[in-house]
Image: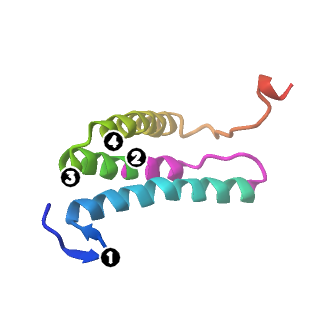
Amino acid sequence: MHEALTELHLITITPWKIIGLLGTLLFTARWFVQFYATKKNKKVTVPMSFWYLSVSGSILTLAYFIWGKNDSVGIIQTAFPMLVSFYNVFAHLKNKDTKETVKPGGPEDN
């Protein structure tokens, strides 16, 4: 998994790096999903797919940091968002009968 598949202009591509890049791509894609849902609903919306992308992206990125790169900073910065994402997936599944919406207008807007 650590052997180079190819080298492109000083960038070495390994299977672990592909896993890490895919995790980053999924973790980033969640913002585009959230943007689209908010624009479509004309109010702030966090769809369930946001949390699925968060979980899958952070699992792949965490695997890269643990086994591919062995980077403790990357592990710490990825583990907490992954736990929060898992929590939100379970919270959504537990309360799937109720429609959840996120509305602006907290105390900071007063």
Residue named by callout 4: 74
Q: Which residues are magenta?
A: 41-56
The residue shown at (32%, 76%) is: 9
Q: Amino acid at mark 2?
A: Val
Q: Earlier in the sequence, mark 3 or mark 2?
A: 2
Residue named by callout 1: 9
Q: Earlier in the sequence, mark 1 or mark 2?
A: 1
Q: Amino acid at mark 4?
A: Gly
Distance Cα–Cα, label 4 vs label 2: 16 Å
Q: Amino acid at mark 3?
A: Gly
Residue named by callout 3: 68
Q: Amino acid at mark 1?
A: His
33 left or right, relative to 86: right
53 left or right, relative to 4: right
Q: How many marks?
A: 4
- Check the image and report above or below for 81 versus 41: above
Answer few, some or many: residues within 10 Å of disc 1's Cα (few below 14, many 20 plus, some between 14 and 19): few
Task: Give the dominant element type of the magenta stretch: helix, strand or loop.
Answer: helix
Is 19 part of what is drawn in magenta?
no
Task: Choose mark 1 or mark 2, whichever is in front.
Answer: 1
The residue shown at (47%, 34%) is: 94
Task: Choose mark 4 or mark 1, whichever is in front.
Answer: 1
Q: How far from the left and from the top, in percent, is residue 52?
A: 44, 50
Q: Earlier in the sequence, mark 3 or mark 4?
A: 3
Q: How far from the left and from the top, in percent, is residue 100?
A: 64, 39
